[in-house]
Image (tube, rainbow, N blue to C red):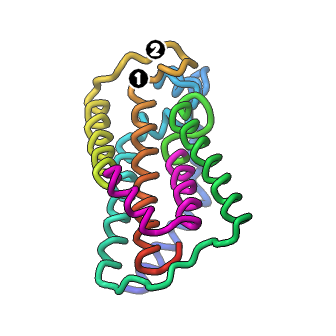
């Protein structure tokens, strides 16, 4: 059986060397132009992620959700850390909170205008999670936990996932919102909404993971 595998590998190797793949016959217009026309937004990358590959993106969001649930599950039986490491000197606190403010503004910009320029929901969520992390290393863990519960962040995270899945299923079924005028803020149909939902999901999910690691590990 081993020699059979070796022979099959050798044949496959010579096949890759001898058989040339034919060049694809693309239309006169470029692929980027076709994606832009179909999605109604100038950011072709976002058009591919949230339209052409929307089926894959749904499961990427679900995988991120499962990862957050897994972190909570795996650390649930551990003893909470009695020592939390964070910045205490004033210059570090000022710089961290300044960076958090900038990261939060960038997150909002990427979420709202991600379909018009480089950016998008995942990048916005990462920027939002970075802002939350910078605040966490300069603030009381109890205060962060209280804010998380007061604003029902866990519930909003789950709601954003459900709405994202529902809108995605509707879009995959062939129903789309009007694309609007290309290049304007209210364009691209459902794509801007999906961007914002992904940003909310990733940012709030990052917040949940940060709180878990602070509680059980004492650090980020």
User: On residue 189, which mark appears?
Assistant: 1
Q: Is residue 69 visible?
A: yes
The residue shown at (31%, 51%) is: 152
Query: Badge 1: how crowded within 10 Å, few (<14), some, or many (20+)?
Result: some
Mark pair 1, 2: CA separation: 7 Å
Residue 11 on image: x %, y % = 51, 69
Q: Is residue 152 above or below residue 178?
A: below
Quarter of the rendering containing residue 2: bottom left
Instruction: Name the residue nearer the viewer: 55 or 212.
Output: 212
Per the image, is 69 magenta? no
Q: Is residue 171 left or right of residue 105?
A: left
Residue 94 on image: x %, y % = 69, 58
Secondary structure predominantly adopted by residues drawn in magenta = helix
Q: Is residue 176 above or below residue 53?
A: above
The secondary element bearing badge 1 is classed as loop
Pointer 1 and pointer 2: residues touching (CB < 8 Å)? yes
Quarter of the rendering containing residue 148: bottom left
Per the image, is 143 magenta? yes
The secondary element bearing badge 2 is classed as loop
The residue shown at (43%, 31%) is: 191
Q: Is residue 25 visible?
A: no
- Which portion, as a residue range, is magenta? 124-153
Q: Is residue 3 above or below residue 139?
A: below
- In the image, farthest residue toward the front: 90
The residue shown at (52%, 56%) is: 132
First-in-chain label (1 vs 2): 2
Q: Which residue is mark 2?
A: 180
Query: Badge 2: how crowded within 10 Å, few (<14), some, or many (20+)?
Result: some
Residue 176 on image: x %, y % = 33, 23
Residue 186 on image: x %, y % = 48, 20
């Amino acid at each position: 059986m081993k020699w059979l595998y070796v022979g099959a590998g050798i044949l496959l190797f010579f096949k890759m060397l001898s058989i040339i793949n034919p060049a694809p016959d693309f239309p006169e217009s470029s692929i980027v132009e076709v994606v832009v026309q179909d999605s109604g937004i100038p950011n072709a990358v976002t058009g591919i992620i949230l339209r052409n590959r929307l089926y894959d993106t749904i499961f990427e969001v679900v995988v991120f959700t499962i990862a957050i649930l897994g972190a909570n599950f795996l650390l649930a039986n551990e003893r909470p850390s009695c020592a939390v490491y964070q910045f205490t000197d004033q210059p570090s606190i000022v710089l961290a909170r300044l960076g958090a403010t900038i990261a939060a503004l960038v997150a909002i910009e990427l979420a709202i205008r991600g379909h018009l320029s480089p950016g998008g929901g995942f990048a916005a969520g990462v920027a939002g999670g970075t802002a939350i992390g910078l605040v966490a290393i300069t603030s009381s863990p109890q205060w962060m936990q209280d804010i998380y519960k007061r604003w029902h962040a866990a519930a909003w995270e789950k709601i954003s996932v459900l709405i994202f899945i529902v809108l995605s299923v509707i879009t995959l079924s062939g129903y789309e919102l009007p694309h609007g005028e290309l290049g304007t803020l209210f364009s691209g149909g459902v794509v801007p909404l999906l961007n914002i939902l992904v940003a909310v999901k990733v940012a709030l999910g990052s917040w949940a993971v940060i709180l878990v690691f602070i509680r059980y590990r004492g650090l980020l």
